[in-house]
Every structure is written in structure tokens, then in C-alpha cells.
Amino acid sequence: MFLLKSIPKVDKFIENEQFDDLSSSLLVSITQEVLQNLRENILKDEVKSFTEDELVQTVLQKYEELTKPSLQKLINATGVIVHTNLGRSLIDAKTFDKVKDVVTSYNNLEYDLAKGKRGERYSHISDVICRLLGCEDVLIVNNNASAVFLILNTFAKKKEVIVSRGELVEIGGSFRIPEVMKQSGAKLVEVGATNKTHLRDYEDSITEKTAMLMKVHKSNYSIEGFSSEVEFKELVRVAKEKNLIDYYDMGSGHLVDLPYGLDQHEPSVLKYMQENPSLLSFSGDKLLGSVQAGIIVGKKEYIAKLKKNQLLRMLRVDKLTLALLEENITSVLLNKLDEIPTLKMLFASTDELRENAQFLKMAVNDICEAHIIETTSVIGGGTTPNRTIPSIAMSVKIKNYKQNKMEKLFRERKIIGRIEDDKFLLDFRAIQKEDIKQIIKVIKEITNV
Ligand SMILES: *Cc1c(COP(=O)(O)O)cnc(C)c1O
């Protein structure tokens, strides 16, 4: 076996000058793997010849694949603004720059500058949030799922929580209210029927074991027709009478008036704060448009209890999260909605979208078949089910490629579009203005393939 004998020795092979700048431990491990594969393929008679340079190129290629970041920038041309698979909400670049200075330096995360003593991690954000919402106190955790878990574990472990049968939601990524409740140690008491729950259903189920009346927002589905649910303010009232805690898991929640009548489908945090609840929680990166986080607001005595739960140590957020969230809330407080990409995209008029679409169409009209169409998109991220908002898209056809092939060609070039009515569409609702140059480049590239 002459070929086997000519496989280079690892020590010698890695001395090749093309490897000079590489990390030697990674280089050795990749080289061992490549040479081992070569050996096996020679034995299987699948390789008849090779050159050292081919091996070098294989190793270099693997090295690059392994060391380049797996998480990378994409262009969202699906039309879905809060797209959980594509990172949910964008952070505004200028906001990120502001925050960069703090997180790349030491900072007062848990340090009270005035007193020169240990400070409180959550204090940075509580002033702005309490001023905005009129709540007594705030706690931030890793995401809204952790908020639900922490609240149930703190107040209802080995006790009962009453929830309507119509609200036992499953959110994408296997977050299910009944399962979360079980894990938290709370006992779920389901009341009412899928389509109808009355206040007396809650009242009749209250026992000495009851800790909480909980409402869950039906984020990603709706119950239509012969249906009714109990308003949260009724639960707040009964909970007060019976000395129980009321809690609303609001899902997305939002802090500003939404366009397209979306307010009717997504509960407003401000509105529910006025009902004087024990606790509310909502996500940081749905319609709030900030970073992944769970925001818990409500009465000081209850937030204090949450802070004492050991579990909080596991769910606590980093300075990066707090700094970004503080910027976001301040932007809302100052009504600078332009600094929140999720809201900016949501509020963009179809005229603005059409202008961007026309700009793109002009640039590529000669090299592909492009049509601007009126369409609709959804908000996504487990918000506003069945609600669509108007959008503008450009259908693209290159050569005689079918829509599936088009989708793949764009996806391979990091542009995620959508297929509708047998057409491949680039929806402008979530395309950033600065993305358009790249889209033009990609269309040119595909035309030349
Ligand atoms: C989205 C959602 C959650 C989970 O929130 P995350 O921030 O994604 O963890 C919990 N409850 C409801 C009702 C939701 O819509």
C-alpha cells in the first residue's frame, strides 16, 4: 500500500508555512481527523491519489468553518417583525453604541455611587419603569417564561392557582402553562370551559389552599363565537376580597398605543396597571422591542418576596440586558419611538415601504422579473393571532427558477423571504433600509450563477 505510506505524519504536516498563524491545538485536532479520514478512504479504495496541497486546503477550510461565528447577520424579508427564529426584536445600533461604553467598562451594576456601598442590581431600571407605569416596584428576569416560573414558585408552591381552561396556552418552544405550573410546585386548578369562563367559576373554586388567581394572555390563538372570559379587573377585585394574589401573564404586553387596531388584541401594560394589580409580567423582546427579558411589575411587598427567592439568582440578568432595557424604557418615556426598531417597523406606513420596494425594483428591473405587490404580514412572536397588517412586497423571479429554488438561493445568501401564491416574495415590513444594497448585490449574484 504505497498510498497509505505516503500519508504525512501529523508533526511534520503541521509545520507547513500556510499554518503559521493558526492555533496549534485546533490545527492538530483537525489534521488528525483529516488524515484519519484519508486513511479510511484509501482502505475503502475511495481515494486513488492525493497531494499534500489538497490536504492543506481541506484542513484550512475546516479550520475556517470551525472558527467563524455560527450566529450571523440575516436579512428578514419574511414580513414578520417579531420573528422568534430570527432573533425577535432588533436592538437599535445607536442605542447599542451608548450601552457599549458601560458594558465594556467596570460600572455601578451593584454599587451605590452616592453611598460608596453595595447597591441594587434592579434599581437602575426601577425608577424609569415605575415613573412610566405608576407601579410600586419592578424586577427583571431572564425572560417572561422565568417570570411566570418565579412568581408561581414564590407564591404558590404546594398551593393552588386558579386559571381559566380557555387560557392554558402553549407558546412556541414548548412553554406550556400546565407544565410550567407543575415544575414550579404549584397546583393548577382549571376552571370554566374552553370557550366560556365566568367569575363564579373562579369564586366557587377558592379554597383555603388557593394562593393566586392567574390570568394568561391568549397570545397565539383566539377563541371566537360563543365565548366569554372574565376581565382581569374582576379577578383583582375578588383576589383583594379573599386576600389572594392576582397575576396577569400578559405575554407581549406593550407600552404605547399600537396602530392597525392591534391594541384590541394585545393588552396594554399601562391600562392593566390602572387596575391596581398584585403582579403583571411581560416580555422584553416582543412588542416592547428590547432585549430578551421578563419584566415583573406590581406591589412592593410582592416584588420584595420575589427578590428573596433563591431561584432569582439563577434567573438574574446581566448588565448588558439592564443597560439595553433602561435605554428602551427611557425612549418610550421620551416618546422617541424611532429608537425602537420593532416599533419603528410597526409604525412605518405602506408608502414608506413602497418607496423602498420601488428603489429596489428600479435597481434590478433589467436583470430579473420583479413586481411590487400589496400584501399583508403578521406581527409574530406569539402576538396578535389572526391579525394581519398591510405590507408591501416585491415578487422576484430569476431565470426560470421555481419559487422553492428562489427561496433557497436567497436563503443561502442570508436573505430569508417567503413564498405566497407560488411566488417568492421579499416583504418590506421588516427589511432595513441599509439591507437594500445587499439585496441588490445578491440578486445580481444569483442572476450570474
Ligand atoms: C411569549 C409568552 C411567554 C414567554 O415569554 P418569553 O419572554 O418568550 O419567555 C409567556 N407567556 C405568554 C402568554 C407569552 O405570550
Image (cartoon, rainbow, N blue to C red):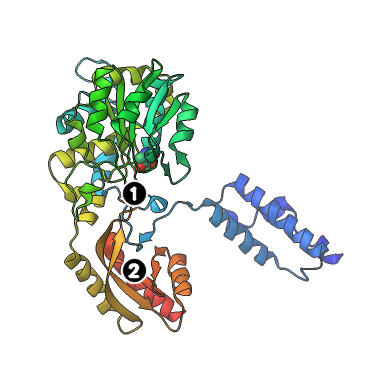
Compare residues 312 and 204 and report the one nearer the observer. Answer: 204
Q: Position of residue 367 (x, y in %)?
A: 35, 83
Residue identifier under label 1: 222
At 18% across and 37% down in the image, what residue appears? 271
At 17% across and 32% down in the image, what residue appears? 133
Q: Amino acid at mark 1?
A: Ser
Compare residues 173 and 127 and report the one nearer the observer. Answer: 173
Q: Is residue 71 left or right of residue 236?
A: right
Compare residues 351 and 110 and report the one nearer the observer. Answer: 351
How crowded pointer 1 is (Cα within 10 Å; few <14, some 14-19, many 20+) is rated as: some
Residue identifier under label 2: 426
Helix, strand or loop at label 2? It is strand
Work out whether 7 lies above or below 394: above
Q: Is residue 288 left or right of residue 43?
A: left
Q: CB under 8 Å between callouts 2 and 1?
A: no
At 29% across and 70% down in the image, what residue appears? 393
Q: Amino acid at mark 2?
A: Leu
